[in-house]
Amino acid sequence: MPLKLEDPTPIKMLKVEWVIVTRENFEEVFADLEKKGIDPVIIGLTDEGYQTLSVNTAQTRKYIILQKEVTKKYREYYEAKDGAKEITTQ
């Protein structure tokens, strides 16, 4: 019996523009943002915080890949062409 699972719609990620603000460039960065009509607001990460964000993103990606594989295996099991209920492992 076929599973009635649709593949999830791919995520359409919005573009994020990163601005690196340092002690040396903060005045220039703020002036440039104000010139462009952008309200300058700082939401910051330390270098360690950025590394943590990168690790979290990698773990999320790994989880999504794993879940896609689980769904694939369910389909192989439930939708076997010969009616057999076998899971092929690698």
Image: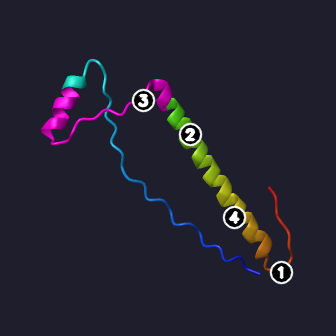
Instruction: Provide residue 44's location: percent of width, then percent of height.
Output: 38, 30
Reading the image, the residue beneath label 2 is 56
Reading the image, the residue beneath label 1 is 82
Mark 1 element type: loop
Q: Please report the residue visible at 36 percent of the width from the left and 45 percent of the height from the top.
A: 16
| Count of number-bearing discs | 4
* Mark 4 vs 2: CB contact within 8 A: no
First of labels 1, 2 by sequence position: 2
Q: Please report the residue visible at 67 percent of the width from the left and 53 percent of the height from the top.
A: 66
Front tag of 1 and 2: 2
Front tag of 3 and 4: 3
Label 3 to label 1: alpha-carbon separation: 55 Å
Identity, as a three-letter code, of the amino acid under mark 2? Asn
Q: Please report the residue visible at 33 percent of the width from the left and 30 percent of the height from the top.
A: 20
Reading the image, the residue beneath label 4 is 71
Q: Give the range drawn in magenta.
A: 28-50
Mark 2 element type: helix
Instruction: Provide residue 64's location: percent of width, then percent of height.
Output: 61, 53
Label 4 to label 1: alpha-carbon separation: 19 Å
* Quadrant of res 30: top left
Label 2 to label 3: alpha-carbon separation: 14 Å
Q: Please report the residue visible at 43 percent of the width from the left and 59 percent of the height from the top.
A: 12
Mark 4 element type: helix
Q: Does the magenta stretch include residue 37?
A: yes
Reading the image, the residue beneath label 3 is 45
Identity, as a three-letter code, of the amino acid under mark 3? Leu
Classify 65 as above or below 72. above
Label 4 to label 2: alpha-carbon separation: 23 Å
Please indicate whether residue 70 sits to the left or right of residue 54 in the image.
right
Identity, as a three-letter code, of the amino acid under mark 1? Asp
First of labels 4, 1 by sequence position: 4
